[in-house]
Image: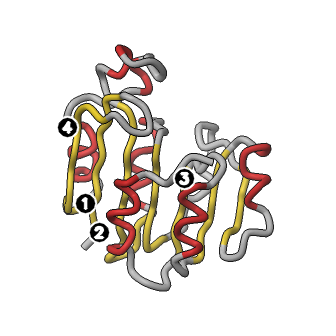
Amino acid sequence: MIAPSPWVVCHLPLVPAGGRVLDLACGHGRHARLFATAGYAVVAVDRDFAAISGLRGVPGVTAMQFDLEGGDWPLAGERFAGVVVTNYLWRPRLADVCALLESGGILIYETFMVGNEAYGKPANPQYLLRPGELRAVAKAGGLREIAFAEGYCNSPKPALRQAICAVRE
């Protein structure tokens, strides 16, 4: 299994202790496991049943299969102390993702940005953030930025990435 993102590890302590955390588009659940080990109740969501099936039975993790890009938003009305999203972008739901945070809740988001096509996939502009895009999303969602980064990184593989940590006050 791939190690947790250093961005997520760095900002995990900002998520209010004892709160529920959503790992959105969780894949095999590297971050769900990280938060569960740190004592959080985690809801891990992905559309790929095979990927999340390995999370069933992991203490502190509730694995749910949802198509996040379908018609109805399956998480409407839910609130979380933390929302973690890595390596995933579906612009039509970015405002919904911000709305999932309760007061004091932390958004930790990291994914690929324009220019990543030089390093491999994803290369489709539909799945690549524009410069400063996560900043604009957080601000439009009523969140206050805590940390922001964008540009080249070499781990776990060379890529152009963008990341934000923001709080709902």
Instruction: Judge by depth and name the residue closer to the eye, 143 or 88.
Output: 88
Instruction: Judge by depth and name the residue closer to the eye, 80 or 95.
Output: 80
Nearer the observer: mark 1 or 4; the answer is 4
Is label 1 in contact with label 4 (beta carbons under 8 Å)?
no
Circle 4 residue? 132
Position of residue 17 measured from the top left corner of the image (x, y, whole percent): 43, 84
Circle 3 residue? 24
Task: Give, as a three-letter code, the residue at label 1.
Answer: Gly
Is label 2 in contact with label 1 (beta carbons under 8 Å)?
yes
- Gap between marks 3 and 4 measured at Cα: 21 Å
Task: Give, as a three-letter code, the residue at label 3.
Answer: Leu
Task: Give, as a three-letter code, the residue at label 2.
Answer: Arg
Task: Give, as a three-letter code, the residue at label 4.
Answer: Gly
Disc 4 element: loop
Labels 3 and 4: the sequence-earlier one: 3
Identified at 52% across, 51% down, the residue is 3
Position of residue 147 measured from the top left corner of the image (x, y, whole percent): 20, 57
Labels 3 and 1: the sequence-earlier one: 3
Checking the image for residue 142, the label placed there is 1
Q: In the displayed orientation, state which residue is furthest to the top.
A: 118
